[in-house]
Amino acid sequence: MIRVVVADDHAIVRSGISRLIEDEPGMSVVAQIEHVDQVLPTVRDTPSDVLLLDVNMKDTLSLEALKAIRNQCERVAVLVLSVYPEKQYAMRYLRAGASGYVSKENAPEELIAAIRRVASGKKYLSETLAETIIFGDTGDAGRSPSEVLSDREYEVLVGIAHGKRIREIAQDIFLSEKTVSTYRTRILKKLNLDNNAAIVEYAILHKIV
């Protein structure tokens, strides 16, 4: 039996995915999670094999939660779910320890196949993402400028793009307001932007939000 934890902040999506999994032979949903700060304690305390982890939960990236799971719960395979383009998020999450990345736009059969694959200890990549990795599509012409940002800088960028204030972002990712402000300054410099409005415009243009 493959025991699955579903982490998604949208109740309808969470419920639909859970029903899909429960209808599959040899699979069971052992927990559902709505908030990103519930991810680590739930996975740590609940016997499970696969975590389905939404990229963006309550407008907060789940990247740090993934890293914490990799440090404390190595037994669990993490399959990342997202509505965002693979190019913007997939490699960042795979480098942080995810076993695979699946778009929510894919067919249900692909999600089930991905769960079975990562539960067996293998990696799951879409054909497009696999080609990117194999053929090394990392030249400047094919890269988003946001790839020069660190994971923390990227989290701050996403928070600003969702209209959050520095204080809110600091609370979301457990950093001081001063540290978040420093990351914001670095983002502006690295991306050659002037202000928060420019960050929002940039995030929309590059399909980050």
Image (cartoon, grey):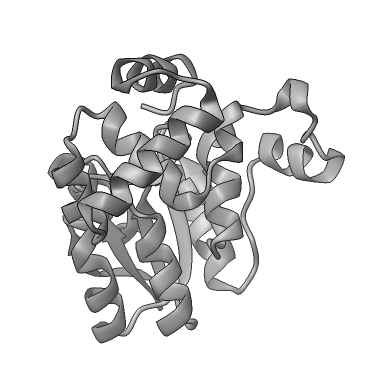
Quarter of the rendering occupied by the C terminus: top left
Tell me if I can see residue 42 in this picture.
yes
Q: Nearer the viewer, residue 91 or 45?
A: 91
Above or below residue 102? Residue 99 is: below
Q: Position of residue 164 (x, y in %)?
A: 18, 34
Q: Position of residue 170 (x, y in %)?
A: 21, 51
Q: Is residue 57 left or right of residue 67?
A: left
Image quadrant containing the N terminus:
bottom left
Q: Residue at x 52, y 21 (%)?
A: 192
Q: Residue, x 30% and y 16% (percent of image)?
A: 197
Q: Is residue 58 visible?
A: no
What's the residue at 22%, 46% (across, down)?
169
What is the x, y in percent for residue 70?
Answer: 47, 75
- Residue 130 pos. (x, y %): 73, 43
Looking at the rendering, which quadrant does residue 33 occupy? bottom left
44 relative to 20, above or below: below
Which sits in the foreground, 18 or 132? 132
Q: Is residue 205 left or right of residue 90?
A: left
For residue 4, side relative to residue 30 (left or right): right
Q: Residue furthest right?
A: 135
Residue 24 sits in quarter: bottom left
> Does residue 47 sit above or below 60 in this rendering?
below
Q: How many marks?
A: 0
